Image (cartoon, grey):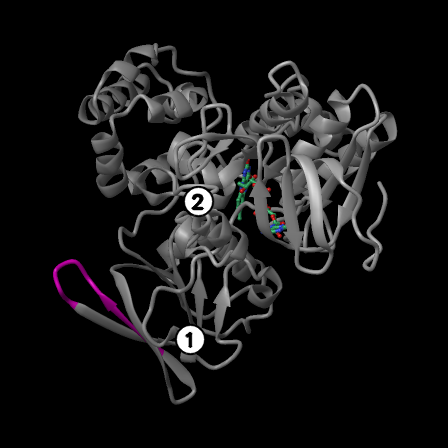
């Protein structure tokens, strides 16, 4: 791996990877592994550490993966690779391999794993990888290559590009939020700031998904004594994983059904599973590998209905948490320290030394409470138009890309090639990760990212190259 020297102009490369989060690193590893001759790869990432992005940047041990170790390999063809790493790096006397396979490992160890495997791939490859600490602001594709513009390094020509810019947090959806006193309105992903919240502070976490869980765990680890209000439109909390045998029903017929029939089928299958002594979670496990096919076989109106009426219920059943984490949340709820509010955030205003939070319930009722901090745990921005990314605005503005279905992310062909405003696939530019949610739905977790990384590299340099 060659390091970046800030003043040097960048020589052209074979592959430019925009973004050095987990997705970008998976692409780099695929390119290094698949190369059978010299190949110059450049990865552009503004952060000074690779493979972090938002998910794996946490340094705190209470933030664990939401998938068991046995299912987090970086490579489809070596499904036990992460587990092997965890076993090899667990101190003697620790849990055995079988226990670790089902364990929810600290997220910081996943970032370490990717960096270790990246180093090994570099050492074993005839290709070279240059890391450039910078941000890409423009991308101009043509039939044979593309030109990138970087904030500090100027232009870079690349024969192939993978766009792996990942997760962008949503701003706090409240009037008054931009005027709040500094340090009182925190992002759930600012893990160190959350950790520094005084133990007696009252706070309101906006959003009740996995980022809320991270925040509550950090507070609980600090023996937090203040009240933790959690506000969301639906007041649904993530449900727990349950380790057990897989359900045996056949999910294939689901693809021919409309949304209502699918939901009926899933509810009936879950009921049947429980009657058969299996956890309901086994039904979700069974359809997990079919997530993309299920989304793509829904009609556009049914996809819209799903986004409007079903998505929240879907999320809490699909994006589950470790059983022990779920138990900690339940204990806090039962103690009354964690208070769940169903409503829409309206305003947050400074009121003396405190913040006044006003919320609107569905029935029109207005609820108000005072806190010391407000935490934005509303999750990932899915609309490319609203992401604060000059690169995405440039791509859309110039018609090199078009918005994805339902305005989510960007439109990509089935193989992941970016599609321009005229509907033509860009032969040398692939998209990976959350920008493809509108097209494929399941597109942010490691099992999808590793597959997309492999397909992109094959599409650019392998037998499928355009
Ligand atoms: C809190 C959290 C927990 C999660 N836990 C799990 C889990 O347990 N298991 C699982 O499978 N998945 C999990 N996920 C899903 C997770 O999103 C993926 O696993 C993975 O981190 C996504 O990687 P990415 O590279 O696509 O995006 P990111 O990690 O967001 O990385 C994108 C990178 O692109 C860079 N970038 C952005 N714009 C530019 C630009 N213009 N130029 C250059 N660089 C740019 C950013 O700096 C960033 O480093 C979690 C996600 C979150 C948010």
Image disc number at residue 200 = none
Q: Is residue 350 magenta?
A: no
Reading the image, the residue beneath label 1 is: 178
Up the image or down, 377 lies above or below 93; here it is below
Percent coordinates x, y for residue 66 in the rendering: 52, 38
Up the image or down, 388 lies above or below 320; here it is below
Percent coordinates x, y for residue 126 in the rendering: 86, 26
Q: Which of the pair 436/347 is nearer the observer?
A: 436
Precedes in sequence: disc 1 or disc 2: 1
- Circle 1 or circle 2, nearest the eye: 2
Work out which quarter of the rendered image holds the N terminus and state it.
top right
Percent coordinates x, y for residue 152 in the rendering: 71, 60
The residue shown at (53%, 28%) is 448
Q: Secondary structure at mark 2?
A: loop
In the displayed structure, does residue 129 sit left or right of residue 225?
A: right
Please tell me in which quarter of the rendered image ligand 1 is found: top right
Image disc number at residue 399 = 2
What's the distance in space between the residues labelled 1 and 2, CA to CA? 32 Å
Q: Secondary structure at mark 1?
A: helix
Asked whether residue 240 is in view, the answer is no
In the displayed structure, does residue 332 sit left or right of residue 19?
A: left
Q: Which residues are magenta?
A: 356-365
């Amino acid at each position: 791996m060659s390091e970046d020297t800030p003043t040097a102009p960048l020589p052209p490369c074979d592959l430019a990877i925009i973004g050095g989060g987990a997705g970008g690193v998976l692409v780099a590893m695929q390119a290094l592994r698949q190369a059978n001759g010299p190949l110059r790869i450049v990865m552009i990432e503004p952060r000074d550490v690779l493979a972090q992005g938002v998910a794996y940047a946490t340094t705190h041990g209470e933030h664990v993966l939401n998938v068991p170790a046995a299912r987090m390999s970086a490579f489809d063809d070596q499904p036990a690779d992460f587990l092997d790493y965890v076993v090899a790096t667990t101190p003697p006397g620790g849990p055995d391999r079988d226990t670790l396979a089902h364990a929810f490992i600290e997220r910081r160890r996943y970032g370490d794993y990717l960096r270790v495997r990246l180093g090994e791939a570099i050492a074993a490859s005839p290709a070279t990888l240059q890391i450039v600490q910078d941000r890409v602001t423009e991308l101009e594709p043509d039939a044979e290559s593309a030109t990138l513009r970087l904030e500090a390094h100027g232009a870079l020509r690349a024969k192939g590009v993978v766009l792996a810019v990942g997760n962008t947090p949503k701003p706090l959806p409240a009037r008054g939020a931009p005027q709040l006193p500094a340090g009182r309105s925190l992002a759930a992903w600012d893990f160190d700031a959350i950790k520094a919240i005084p133990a007696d502070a009252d706070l309101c976490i906006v959003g009740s998904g996995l980022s809320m869980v991270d925040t509550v765990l950090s507070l609980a680890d600090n023996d937090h004594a203040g009240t933790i209000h959690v506000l969301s439109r639906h007041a649904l909390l993530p449900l727990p994983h349950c380790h057990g045998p897989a359900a045996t029903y056949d999910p294939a017929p689901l693809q021919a059904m409309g949304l209502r029939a699918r939901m009926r089928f899933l509810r009936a299958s879950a009921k049947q599973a429980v009657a058969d002594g299996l956890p309901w979670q086994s039904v979700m496990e069974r359809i997990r590998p079919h997530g993309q096919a299920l989304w793509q076989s829904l009609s556009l109106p049914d996809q819209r209905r799903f986004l409007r009426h079903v998505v929240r219920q879907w999320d809490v059943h699909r994006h589950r948490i470790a059983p022990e984490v779920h138990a900690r949340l339940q204990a806090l709820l039962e103690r009354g320290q964690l208070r769940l509010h169903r409503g829409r955030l309206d305003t947050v205003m400074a009121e003396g030394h405190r913040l006044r939070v006003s919320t609107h319930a569905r029935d029109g009722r207005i609820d108000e409470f005072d806190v010391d901090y407000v935490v934005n745990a509303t999750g990932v921005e899915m609309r490319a138009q609203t992401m604060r990314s000059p690169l995405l605005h440039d791509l859309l503005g110039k018609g090199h890309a078009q918005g994805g279905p339902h305005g989510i992310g960007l439109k990509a062909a089935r193989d992941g090639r970016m599609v321009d405003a005229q509907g033509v696939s860009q032969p040398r530019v692939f998209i990976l990760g959350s920008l493809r949610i509108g097209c494929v739905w399941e597109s942010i977790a490691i099992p999808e990212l590793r597959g997309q990384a492999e397909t992109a590299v094959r599409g650019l340099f392998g037998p499928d190259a355009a």
